[in-house]
Image: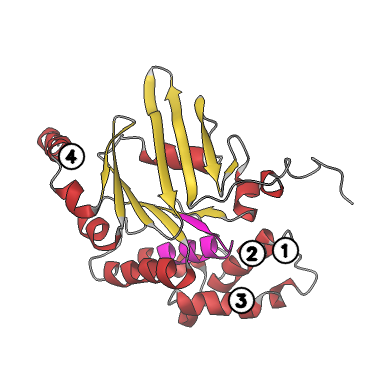
């Protein structure tokens, strides 16, 4: 067999661990850039099956938090736990293969590849295979690919190049790439950003169906408060790198500190 460490770090998921209802948890997670505290001692827990929103003004540290959770950035201090295992410092490809997937603020798709090829590449990569143009790679994972495209409403655009898609459809395609990783935990970074008002409702329904029908725990960063309050089970509010509030949508709407933060941001704009 392959020598330990040749491709992946030691597997924390292979060790016995206590059963936890929290699929994701952090303990005093921090990260600074020079003198700027982007994330300050963030401790949170997300139960399995929950749809959690993380909100806050621009610069609150939301995307930096996602980058820490997914291994794109190392933390300065604190710990990250996924499915009960300590994953602090583990790389993104390893976490993806063990059930943690994400989308990005800026679309990250292959513009020259077709919609179908984009999803096939993601499926093949998740299973440790490579794309070989000299072999029959284009015939691999076709059923799984077409099922995902149908679910995302992209089946009729399967043969289009990624560059030919509307902005909203590119967001859908990026979500298809994340779902190709068969995640247990899906992190969505501003999924409706740049979408038209007419495109948002169907994407919101899709996010809700993924959580409820596929039991994929979802954490999303979102600036559209109509989206946040319509889909979230629970909301975490960040400001200047720290968590300042957490609660059900109704509690967050009525929270004076949250109102102060957003009103202050609005006055400065």
Query: Which residue sits at x=24%, y=71%?
Result: 198
**Where, by quadrant of the figure, is residue 74 drawn?**
top right
Q: Is residue 133 left or right of residue 161?
A: right
Q: Earlier in the sequence, mark 4 or mark 3?
A: 3
Q: Position of residue 42 (x, y in %)?
A: 39, 33
Q: Secondary structure at mark 4?
A: helix
Disc 3/disc 1 C-alpha distance (Å): 16 Å
Disc 4/disc 3 C-alpha distance (Å): 43 Å
Disc 4/disc 2 C-alpha distance (Å): 42 Å
Q: Earlier in the sequence, mark 1 or mark 2?
A: 2
Residue 28 or residue 162, whichever sits in front: 28
Span colored in magenta: 170-186
**Mark identifier at residue 258:** 4
Q: Which residue is mark 2?
A: 121
Disc 4/disc 1 C-alpha distance (Å): 48 Å
Residue 223 or residue 9, whichever sits in front: 9
Query: Which residue sits at x=43%, y=18%?
Result: 34
Q: Position of residue 209 (x, y in %)?
A: 39, 71
Is the residue under label 2 in contact with that under label 1 (CB below 8 Å)?
Answer: yes
Q: Which residue is mark 1?
A: 131
Q: Secondary structure at mark 3?
A: helix
How many labels were placed on the picture?
4
Q: Earlier in the sequence, mark 2 or mark 3?
A: 2
Q: Which residue is mark 3?
A: 144
Nearer the observer: mark 2 or 3; the answer is 3
Q: Residues within 10 Å of mark 2 (few under 14, many from 20)?
A: many
Q: Residues within 10 Å of mark 3 (few under 14, many from 20)?
A: some
Nearer the observer: mark 4 or 1; the answer is 4
């Amino acid at each position: 067999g392959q020598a330990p460490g040749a491709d992946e770090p030691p597997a924390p998921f292979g060790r016995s661990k206590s059963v936890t209802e929290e699929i994701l948890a952090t303990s005093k997670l921090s990260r600074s850039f020079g003198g700027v505290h982007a994330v300050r001692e963030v401790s949170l827990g997300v139960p399995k099956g929950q749809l959690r929103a993380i909100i806050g003004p621009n610069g609150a540290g939301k995307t930096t938090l996602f980058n820490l959770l997914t291994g794109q950035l190392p933390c300065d201090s604190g710990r990250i736990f996924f499915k009960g295992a300590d994953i602090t410092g583990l790389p993104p490809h390893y976490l993806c293969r063990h059930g943690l997937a994400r989308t990005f603020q800026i679309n990250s798709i292959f513009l020259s590849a077709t919609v179908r090829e984009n999803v096939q590449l993601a499926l093949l990569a998740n299973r440790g295979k490579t794309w070989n143009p000299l072999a029959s790679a284009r015939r691999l994972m076709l059923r799984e690919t077409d099922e995902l495209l149908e679910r995302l409403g992209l089946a009729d655009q399967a043969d289009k190049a990624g560059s030919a898609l509307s902005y909203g459809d590119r967001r859908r395609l990026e979500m298809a790439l994340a779902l190709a990783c068969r995640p247990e935990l899906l992190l969505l970074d501003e999924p409706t950003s740049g979408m038209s008002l007419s495109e948002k409702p169907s994407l919101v329904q899709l996010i809700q169906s993924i959580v409820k029908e596929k039991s994929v725990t979802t954490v999303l960063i979102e600036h559209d408060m109509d989206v946040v309050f319509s889909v979230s089970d629970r909301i975490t509010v960040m400001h200047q790198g720290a968590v300042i509030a957490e609660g059900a949508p109704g509690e967050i709407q009525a929270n004076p500190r949250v109102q102060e933060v957003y009103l202050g941001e609005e006055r400065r704009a």
